[in-house]
Structure formats: C-alpha cells, structure tokens
Image: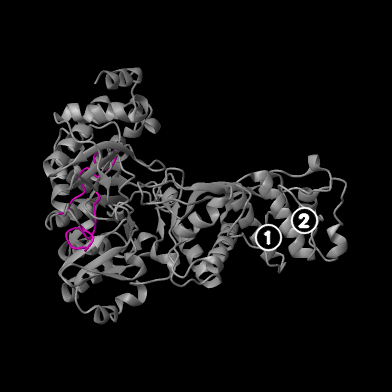
Amino acid sequence: MEALQQAHDARAKKLNKIEQIKELKTPQEAYDKLEQYAKDGYESIPDEDKKYFLKCFGIYDRPATPGKFMIKFRVPGGHLNSAQARAIGECSKEYGEDYIDLTTRAQCELRYLEIENLPTIVKKMQDVGMDAYQTGVDNIRGIMGDPLDDLGFDNILPSQKTLLKLQETFLYSPEWISTLPRKFNTAITGSMTNRCNIFCHDASFALAQKDGVFGYNMYIGGKVGVVAKNADIFLKNEEEVVKAFGSIIDLFKRFGFRDNRNKNRLHFLIEAVGIEVMSQAIRENAGIDFATAGMIMTTVDSDDADHGKVQLRDGTFGVHVVVPSGVFKGSAMIQVADLSDKYGNGEVRFDMEQSLYILGVNEVDLMLAEPFFLEYKSLSSPYFNHLIACAGTAHCPFGVIENKNDAINMAKYLEEKVPLENAKVRMYWSACVKGCGIHGLGDIGFEGCKVKVDGETVGGVHISLGGKLVSEGEEGHTVIKSAPLTHANFYVETLMLEYQKNKGSSEKLESFIDRVMKQYTFANIGFHMKLGAYLRDKSIDIDFEINEKTKTGRNEEFEVFELGRRLYYALSKQEAYSAYERFTNVLKGEKPENIRNLVPDIDENIALLCEAILHQKEEKRAVVFSELTPLIELY
C-alpha cells in the first residue's frame, strides 16, 4: 500500500471545489428537504444543493431547461419489469413532457421536471421498487450487466444476482454516499456476447475460464476514451467477486485523488502506481491471493439488433426495439409495458445502445403487427440498429452540438444515399470531448466540436474509425478533425460507398475496416473521404476508390504519390510517368504532360492536386495529405 499512499500524498496539497462543497453538509441533509423545496419552490433551493447534493440522488438541475430538473433512475443491469416500465412512462407523461432518454449505461432519465412534482415521482417509483439513489456525481453509479442474463443461450454464468450483491455493498449506505473522489462505473457479465460494453468501466468482471472453472477476469481503470486494463485477477465465484469489488472501491475511496477533477478517476491512480501495484493492492486489501487471469470468453459482439429478435433458452424470444439516439416517450414506455404483459413475460430490458428488449414473447409476428411498431422498429436499417447519441446541447451543459438529431439526420441521409443489406454499422455520437456517447468505441465515432467556416463558428465533429467492443475493447482513431456538420454526411458517405461496393456478403463494417482500411494511414483515409465528397460535389464521375490491397505499407509519402498516380490515370487514361519503382518515377528527367491538356475541362483544384503530387522535381512534391487538403475542402 506504500506506493498508493505516496501517490495520494503527492496530490493531496489542495482540494478541488467539489470536495470543499462536500464539507458543507451531508447529502442526506439536502435530500431530506426535498419535500420542503417542493412546497417552497425552485428559488428556495440553495446553490450547493442544486449544483451537487441533490445529484447524489439522481436529481439534476439542468441549466439548458431553466427551473427544470432531470432525474436518473437506477436500473440494475438494465433489468426492469412491466410495472416499473409503466411507472416510468406515467411519470414522464404526466410530469416530464412525455420525454425519456435511454442511456448508454442501460439506465433512463426523465427531463423537464418541476421541483413541486419530484417528491411525487420519487414516491411513485419507490412503490414499484425503483429509485435514483447514488446515480450522480461522486458515487458508485448504476451497475451494468447483460440484458439477457440467465436467458440467452450464450450466458454461461448467470450474474444478475451477483450484480445485486455488489449493489448491496454500497447502496443507501452513508459510508458510500458521495464519499468517493469521483464517479465509479461497474459492469459484470457471465455471457460470451458483450452486451454491456464490459471493457470500459472503472471495474469490470468479464466471463473467463481457468483450469476448467468458469469465473470472471477483472479489468480496472476504464473510462470514456480509455479501455480498462487487465488486472491479471481471476475470480472463481460470487464471494470472490464481491471481495474484489469491495477491495477496489475501498482503495479508490482511501487513495484516490481529490485535487484536479479532470484527473481523478481511478484510471489516474492506476497510472500513477502501475497496474501491477494496483492488482497486488486489491489482493492484499481483500485478504485473498486471487488467481491470475484466465482465458477471456466474452469475445462476441452483439448482433441481436441486426435480427430484431433473439431466441431465449425457454424457446421464447427477446424482441428488440430500436430507439434512435435513445429518444423515447413516456407514452411509448407505457405501450412497452402493455406489450410486455400481453405478449411477453412482464420483463423489459434496456441495453447499452439506448434501445430495449421485450422478453418472453411467443407470438412475435402478432406483436410486431401492433401500432407501436409503426414508430419504433424491431429491425431498422443498419444505420439505425446500433445508433448511439448522448444528450447534446438541448440537455447537457457540456455539449457543443445538438447531437441526437445530428445522428438521426446522418442515419437518414445514409439510408437514402447508400442503402445497405446484410450489414452492420455502429455509429456512436458524443456531443463533446467527455464522450458520453462512447464515440471512441464505434465503427465510426463522432465527437462534437466547434469549427470556423467563413469566419463564423458552427457545429462540427471529429470523425474516428475502428473502435471495438470485443477482444478487450479498442479505441478508434481520428481520421478527420473539425468537419462541419453540414459536410460530415458527405465524408461518411464516401466511406459507406466503399463499404457497400467492396464488403463481403455479410461483412460487418468493423471487419471491413480491419480488412481494408487498416492497410492505410489515418491521414490517407480521411483525405480519401474528403476527396470522394469533393468529386461527387463537382460531378467528376471517375472510377476512383480505395484499393482492397495495397503495397504502400502505411507510409504516407508512398500513399500520397500512389493516390496522385491513380488519380491522374483515372482522369486521363494514361500514366503520368513511363515507369515506377518504390512509388516514384524511374526516369528522373521525365516530365508528366500537363493534365489540363489531356482533360480540357478538368476542375482546377484537381489539376493542382495532381501537379503537387506528381511534380517533375521530387523535392517539390507533396509528401503528406495535410498539404493537399485545402484544395478539396467543400467550405
């Protein structure tokens, strides 16, 4: 523990403002006044309660909707019954403008709530066994799990009961309400399919096998933008999982940093001492010499949404409901509850892609004929089936773009321009760098930003490719920075046209990126996406796509020359030089013919592009794509 103490002491010189606020009172003192605040009105609530203490109980004052609150319910593992779903829907419909957000943590949020109604909402939800305790700020948040736990064919170790045991460790306990340095996210799955983003939490327990025994490998230190590290710990049963969990949250509580809130998640403590030190501390603090990690078995990406349903062990089906960007209605949630009672087993599940399942359905076709499915599809297009978008400027003070409708509009655009069959596309949108839309894990990720266009600041996105949820997770890489939202659709269209034309019969975009796009530098991919948009905009109809095989070896200088050579040929039907070797011309005195002579009506920027890449003098040739990008910008 000495290394942990030293790391803690090195950053214990001052407390951040939130830690200073915590010293004013206990969170319970604020919560106990909720009914009084409801009687006296919004203006009677002290600033510290609005800004912090009420958030400990999932009650958020939202500056984006002045005088109105959001409440975030705790939905363990995304599991809820029809009575709970109905109560959520009724509260939303009666008190929250019929609006619900489904989140990437398989929870749900009601918005537009007035303080006068909050005690009534809290009581109504408590009557069906739900509340919002410890769902905000510096608490152990809602624990994620497999929505098909104990039901899916791929579920080896039913884990929901263990999840609830973990929850018992801290829930309602003053010892754990607002006593952590920062929020703490947890997940557990005993399934082979990753339906809960298992590798990106502060503490994760993922299905594994060691010496013929099924258990869990432990991963720690994940957060938005950072995949958790393998703690090299195998937990053989529920008792060990609970002990390991208790150990890591205690260590974080005791040694976590309380100075800079931007650098005080568990990740930064692990970064300071090293994963080996932290793993040993977990063992020592638990009093158990846990086995080293086993073979990870949660290795399959979830395809349920691509079929609209999934057969369960008892022969019934879990019917998937696509909720674009997680924007749902209270009235629709009531319908879900009714459908669950009429056709299912009274059980509903939220998932990490902001959608839901109705479980235990026998008569699937009969249920799908209900009017509800005219608005919410069981099976939508590949662009909508896995679409994620966080709250955005309409509801979040950190958002820099609207986001939810931006995501929906792009999906609609791509549906029209590049229809796909037998495909899987995961587009994940975050409205800011905080990344609540887990954009880094998407096949295509979008991170909101601001962009200057003609001297005016407009909404934009950084675009990334290649994120993964499986194989212990992987963050994507940025291919285009600061794309205006007005143009981002066109850039992604280029990528999807490549995918449409060259994908295998049922190849997922993730696999296509691995097979084709990862042969190229990220700069090349981004430039190609922009070039395709430029060619279409200027109605330059040439056959110019990314080759499925390349020999450039991810060398950007080689890639630039090869692109110029291919573009010159595609336009003129002749080579710029008579012979090539190692991505340059063999005859050094040779001069390419001016492409304007070969293509009289050529776009001047494209002509300049060819000249910059294929200049007779090698020392004057462009060697990086950033030199060329200004020639093909659409703004």
Of 175 and 361, nearer the camera is 361
Give the secondary structure at mark 2: helix
Give the secondary structure at mark 1: helix
Of 176 and 618, nearer the camera is 618
Can you say whether 226 is above or below 443 in the image?
A: above
Of 505 and 449, nearer the camera is 505
Checking the image for residue 601, the label placed there is none
Q: Residues within 10 Å of mark 1 (few under 14, many from 20)?
A: many
Q: Residues within 10 Å of mark 2 (few under 14, many from 20)?
A: some
**Image point 38% across, 51% down: which residue?**
65
Q: Is residue 24 visible?
A: no
- The residue labelled by disc 2 is 605
Can you say whether 581 is above or below 263 in the image?
A: below
- The residue labelled by disc 1 is 534
The amino acid on which the numbered mark 1 sits, given as a three-letter code, is Tyr
Is residue 151 highlighted in magenta?
yes
**Image point 26% across, 55% down: which residue?**
192
The magenta segment: 130-155
Q: Would residue 140 appear left or right of 633 to someone viewing this image?
A: left
Of 24 and 388, nearer the camera is 388
Q: Quadrant of the C terminus?
A: bottom right
Give the percent coordinates (x, y) of residue 5: 27, 19
Q: Tell me whether the residue at label 2 lies in contact with that at label 1, contact meaning CB atoms closer than 8 angstroms.
A: yes
Q: CA distance from mark 2 to mark 1?
A: 10 Å
Q: Is residue 63 visible?
A: yes
